[in-house]
């Protein structure tokens, strides 16, 4: 009686099958990762759209945009009092967070104990899903972080009592009206992405060559200014680690540097933001608080007309700075960003 012999896989055939599966996985994995990033980017865009609607609703209710923050300044002196609350905090009632807003005591600082029930919160609208580092910077003081900064200057942010205001959408003690945006709302940045817990050098002495009307006009000169002065009275800190405070380094960004531009300092080298004397100390505040993201090739931005646009890292510095001014009179081509 003949028994039919069963034939199994040979070792070579098995290895071929495994190799084919590995190739298929290698081909599919980038597509899966790309699809996931696309979904995260859409989520990020929607966050900015919600922030844009909140700004518009705030303007409808108050006749002007919210101030960067407020403080009491008599003459040219340093502030006699301030509470630090920034734009993100003031938009809360227009983002379906009325109870949270009602819990804020604007007569106290964001860091005073009665207010930490709010300032310790992580706000979903302020977190981009592509940034996986959004846990609090300090577990002992777990202030909520942010991935979106408000436009608060180019290099110049705040000059102190009696000084001219900055050229951007949001400023200390100033609530801009729509009429002030003579460059056009569709040509003016309101907000842009930033990285939570960004390495920062702040409270620096003001270097020579910085004034409200005089500052580095190109990236290389700006980067050199920072690398030469980041130890000049500065202290190391963590930027965008507190959404509740209106200072440029925590709730804002500036157009001093183009999106994703790196300024590397120290050993090992670290990409940093840079900030001179804080607004709450009376200024003058000059800052390179760069818009950054975890999206390849650029950052998502919010404009004054509520539109959200992806700005490439390759955008020219003059164009980027022109988008940051409300009344600079620059002529910007639609294909330049």
Image (spheres, helix red, strand yellow):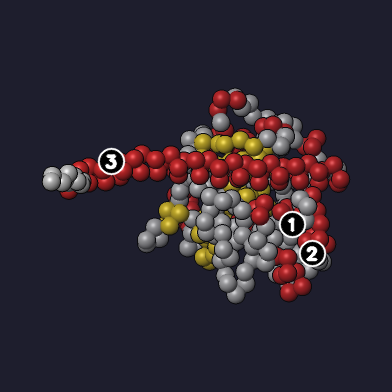
Q: Circle 3 is placed at which residue position? A: 20
Residue lying farthest front? 1
- Please name the residue shown 59% across and 41% down the image: 42
SS at mark 3?
Answer: helix
Find residue 203 and report its image quarter: bottom right
Q: Earlier in the sequence, mark 2 or mark 3?
A: 3
Residue 300 image offset from top left, x and y in percent: 58, 41
**Residue 131 point in image, percent of width and height:** 53, 53
Where is the C terminus found, in terms of image quarters? Answer: top right
Q: Residues within 10 Å of mark 2 (few under 14, many from 20)?
A: many
In the picture provided, is 234 more to the left or to the right than 77?
Answer: left
| Left or right: 33, with 78 as reference point | left
Residue of label 2: 104
Label disc, if present, on residue 137 of the rendered structure: none
Q: Is residue 127 visible?
A: yes
Query: What residue is shown with label 1?
Result: 89
Task: Please say if the residues under marks 2 and 3 sit with CB atoms less than 8 Å apart.
Answer: no
Depth check: 307 or 325 in front?
A: 307
Above/below status of 141 relative to 192: below
Question: Label 2 vs label 3: CA separation?
Answer: 59 Å
Q: CA distance from mark 3 to mark 1?
A: 54 Å
Q: Secondary structure at mark 2?
A: loop
Where residue 145 appears, as percent x and y from the top left, is 61, 60
Residue drawn 53% across and 50% down?
A: 130
Say whether marks 1 and 2 touch (CB < 8 Å): yes
Mark 3 or mark 1, earlier in chain: 3
Position of 206 relative to 193 (above/below): below
Question: Label 1: how many residues lie within 10 Å, few (<14), some (14-19) or many (20+)?
Answer: many
């Amino acid at each position: 009686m003949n028994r039919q012999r069963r034939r199994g896989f040979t070792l070579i055939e098995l290895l071929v099958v495994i190799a084919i599966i590995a190739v298929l996985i290698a081909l599919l994995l980038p597509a899966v990762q790309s699809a996931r990033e696309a979904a995260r980017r859409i989520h990020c865009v929607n966050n900015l759209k919600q922030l844009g609607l909140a700004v518009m609703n705030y303007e409808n209710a108050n006749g002007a945009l919210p101030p960067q923050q407020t403080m009491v300044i008599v003459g040219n002196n340093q502030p006699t009092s301030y509470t630090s609350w920034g734009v993100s905090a003031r938009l809360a009632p227009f983002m379906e967070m009325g109870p949270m807003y009602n819990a804020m005591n604007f007569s106290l600082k964001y860091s005073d104990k009665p207010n930490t029930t709010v300032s310790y919160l992580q706000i979903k609208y302020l977190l981009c899903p592509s940034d996986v580092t959004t846990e609090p910077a300090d577990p002992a003081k777990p202030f909520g972080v942010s991935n979106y900064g408000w436009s608060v200057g180019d290099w110049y942010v705040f000059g102190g009592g009696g000084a001219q205001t900055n050229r951007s959408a949001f400023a200390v003690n100033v609530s801009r009206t729509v009429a002030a945006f003579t460059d056009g709302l569709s040509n003016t940045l309101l907000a842009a992405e930033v990285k939570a817990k960004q390495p920062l050098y702040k409270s620096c002495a003001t270097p020579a060559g910085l004034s409200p009307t005089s500052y580095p006009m190109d990236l290389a000169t700006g980067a050199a200014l920072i690398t030469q002065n980041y130890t000049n009275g500065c202290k190391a800190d963590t930027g965008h680690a507190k959404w509740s405070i209106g200072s440029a380094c925590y709730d804002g960004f500036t157009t001093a540097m183009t999106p994703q531009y790196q300024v590397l300092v120290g050993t090992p080298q670290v990409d940093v933001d840079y900030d001179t004397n804080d607004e709450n100390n009376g200024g003058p505040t000059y800052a390179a608080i760069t818009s950054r993201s975890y999206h390849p090739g650029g950052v998502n931005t919010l404009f004054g007309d509520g539109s959200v646009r992806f700005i490439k890292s390759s955008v020219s510095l003059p164009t980027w700075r022109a988008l940051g001014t409300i009344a600079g009179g620059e002529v910007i081509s639609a294909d330049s960003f």
